[in-house]
Image (tube, helix red, strand yellow):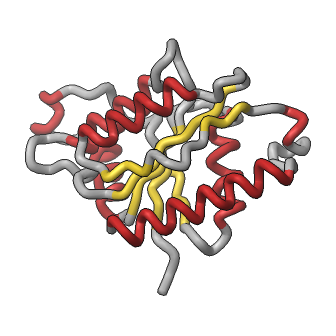
Amino acid sequence: MSAPVVAVLVGSLRAKSINRRLAENIARIAGDRLQLKILEIGDLPLYNDDLWADPPASVLRFKQEIAAADAVMAITPEYNRSFSAPLKNAIDWGSKPMGKNVFSGKPAVATGATPGALGALAGVMATAQLLGVVGCAVMTTPGVYFSAKPEHHDENGVLTEEGTISFLSGWIDSFATWIKKVG
């Protein structure tokens, strides 16, 4: 049996963002336990219900990728004690139009990174709440609120701190179990 496919939504659009780096590190640590697929959300237009008359190709692609995945992982920075606008926009597109919500019933988890001591806690909690609102079965425990420290990564952004790697590995195991239980 192959590993579950997890659609990963990275809420920061910067190519070298700490949240994209977190997603890449989680994928590396997951190995063959989960197949993480980072989805493009930067090309989605701002949500506009009028666009359903002739949906943009990027929206149709995104909805298809979420529908095909076994689970969803949202990785968000914390902006003003909440999640990012690109992440909210992507979730809005995926949950609409009425009756065509591709998130409904999907196992999901939220995490995120900031350089601060609280590690995106408020953003992660708000994201988890939104994922629940759109019908995901959200794993809330254990939680990861990642405080990104440069000294825990090599020059290529690869996580090197063994305690953090071990913790993330256990979290990945918990999410893989959650996917089997809920999915």
Identify the residue at horizontal 18%, vertical 40% (top origin): 96
In this rendered view, identify the residue nearer to me: 94 or 30.
Answer: 30
Q: Position of residue 129 (x, y in %)?
A: 35, 34
Q: Residue furthest front?
A: 141
Identify the residue at horizontal 53%, vertical 33% (top origin): 76
Identify the image quadrant of the C terminus. bottom left
Q: Can residue 20 be spotted in the picture?
A: yes
Q: How many marks?
A: 0
Q: Position of residue 61 (x, y in %)?
A: 33, 52
- Specify the quadrant of the image occupied by residue 178: bottom left
Q: Position of residue 89 (x, y in %)?
A: 34, 30
In this rendered view, identify the residue nearer to me: 156 or 48.
Answer: 156
Q: Residue furthest top?
A: 80
- Specify the quadrant of the image occupied by residue 148: top right
Indicate left or right for 138 with 135 as reference.
right
Q: Can residue 39 be spotted in the picture?
A: no
- Specify the quadrant of the image occupied by residue 66: bottom left
In this rendering, is residue 1 above or below 156? Answer: below
Identify the residue at horizontal 90%, vertical 35% (top origin): 151
In this rendering, is residue 1 above or below 47? Answer: below
Indicate left or right for 155 with 13 as reference.
right
Indicate left or right for 169 with 127 as reference.
right
In this rendered view, identify the residue nearer to me: 155 or 49.
Answer: 155
Indicate left or right for 127 with 119 as reference.
left
Q: Position of residue 125 (x, y in %)?
A: 45, 31
